[in-house]
Image (cartoon, rainbow, N blue to C red):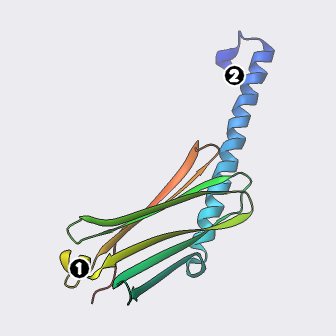
Amino acid sequence: MGKYKYVSFGLRVSILAIDLCILVLFSLSLYTISTGLMGIMSNPNESIKIDLGFNDVSREYFMIIRLNAVNNGFVDMNVKFDASICTASGVVVRSASNSTTIPPHSLKTLSLKFTLTESDVLKYGFDVNPPYMNMGLEFRVISNLFGLRVDIGNVRIGGG
């Protein structure tokens, strides 16, 4: 407070009050984001579900990724979940994104669906070189003022 020594006492108190409000908002944001991330990381078998399959009627391969995102914090949390399927050389074949706002002390499921026809599999050479997946998970709180993004890249899907 040395640089404010010629300022009135009321102005000093208001500056201190604003600083305390920013500190409280930052603390609430950090707590909300960390509990959301820990909710996923503490039990990934329950938080992330992946279904792979083949539809005989449409002759398409499909992959559905479901993410159970939980908000144990005190403020609304915006969650964005995106992923892309790439070739070994990095060409993006399919991408999907989903986002939602989760109120405090609640859970929502975000899902992404990818489909590839048999001709896509042959066209991109997935029968020889399995595809790779890049995923991103983003948490934002307090009107997107504070946030955290986690990226997971080059996850190989299938192959021997």
Residue 50: % across, % down: 48, 80
Does 82 sit above or below residue 77? below
Q: Is residue 72 left or right of residue 43?
A: right
Residue 134: % across, % down: 37, 66
Residue 13 found in image quarter: top right
What is the three-letter code of the residue carrying label 2?
Answer: Met
Does 46 sit above or below residue 22? below
Identify the residue at horizontal 80%, vertical 15% (top origin). 9
Report whether residue 83 is seen. yes
Report whether residue 152 is seen. no
Residue 16: % across, % down: 74, 27
Identify the residue at horizontal 55%, vertical 49% (top origin). 147
Residue 40 found in image quarter: bottom right
Q: Nearer the viewer, mark 2 or mark 1?
A: 1
Q: Which residue is mark 2?
A: 1
Residue 114: % across, % down: 40, 73
Identify the residue at horizontal 71%, vertical 9% (top origin). 6
**Residue 119's mark?**
1
Q: Residues within 10 Å of mark 1 (few under 14, many from 20)?
A: few
How far apart, in angstroms, are the residues tagged by discs 2 and 1?
70 Å
**What secondary structure is found at the residue carrying circle 2?**
loop
What is the three-letter code of the residue carrying label 1?
Answer: Ser
Furthest residue to the right? Answer: 10
Tell me whether circle 2 and circle 1 mark residues in contact (CB < 8 Å): no
Furthest residue to the front? Answer: 57
> Which of pointers 2 and 1 lies earlier in the amino acid sequence?
2
